[in-house]
Image: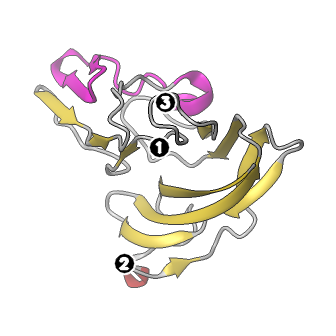
Amino acid sequence: YIIQVQFFFKLGWRHGQGPGCTQSTLGQLVTGMNTTYWNCENGCGSRLQLSNVNYICTGASVAEDFEQGERSFTYTFSGPGPFTVSFTGGDWISLSDGKGGNWNISTVVNLAPRSDTGRPNNSPQSVSKPAYIMQYNCFETLQIPVIDLDGDHIRCRWANKDECGGICNGVPSGILDPVSIISENRSAI
């Protein structure tokens, strides 16, 4: 039972704190984080390093204090799992509410065939910016684009403490609609 899985990721960092994305390296592989890895934390027998977090630079702004990029990697799993694959980082962009702390991205990989499709599950996918700027004294709605190739119902949730570090309450008056919509009444802050 051997299955190769392709992981796609997009990461954003404080400017200068990630792999090294700048305006002059847009579209290029930036490699400033050769010793920082996506890891298999559970199910692989022991903690395994799967891939570094270097990426193709897709955006950078000194004024908005961010850099971002995306890349994919493949890993061959033996057995159906489940396996937990994760990455822990730091260097949040400065926010008006909340700051500091490490963050964690993780996914559970279950390669057992689904009863409805006879194939392993396809993970839901979303794309968004690393940060959104919202005006004070305004009600704003942010719709997060999501898709699931299996047609599964997708629900949004707030990050938990292990995932969001020191900015867990970064949107204190925010309302989360589980159908991927976040509304914020900035006049309440």
Q: Which residue range is magenta in the image?
A: 160-189
Q: Nearer the viewer, residue 142 or 80?
A: 80
For marks 1 and 2, the one nearer the N-term is 2
Q: Nearer the viewer, residue 2 or 179?
A: 2
Q: Nearer the viewer, mark 1 or mark 2?
A: 1
Q: Which label belongs to residue 162? A: none
**For the point 82% across and 44% down, which residue is it?**
44
In which quadrant will I find the C terminus? top left
The residue labelled by disc 3 is 167
- Is residue 161 inside the magenta stretch? yes
Q: Nearer the viewer, residue 93 or 117?
A: 117
For numbered disc 1, what is the local secondary structure? loop
Vertical comparison of 31 with 76: above or below: below
Q: Amino acid at mark 3?
A: Ile
**For the point 41% across and 40% down, which residue is it?**
124
The residue labelled by disc 2 is 23
Q: Along the horizontal axis of the image, is 52 left or right of 64?
A: right
**For the point 59% across and 38% down, which residue is it?**
107
The answer to whether residue 111 is seen in the rendering is yes
Q: Amino acid at mark 1?
A: Asn
Count all numbered tags in the image, as a single digit: 3
Q: Position of residue 70 (x, y in %)?
A: 46, 64
Q: Position of residue 93 (x, y in %)?
A: 45, 47
Q: Which label belongs to residue 122? A: 1
Q: Amino acid at mark 2?
A: Gln
Q: CA distance from mark 1 to mark 2?
A: 34 Å
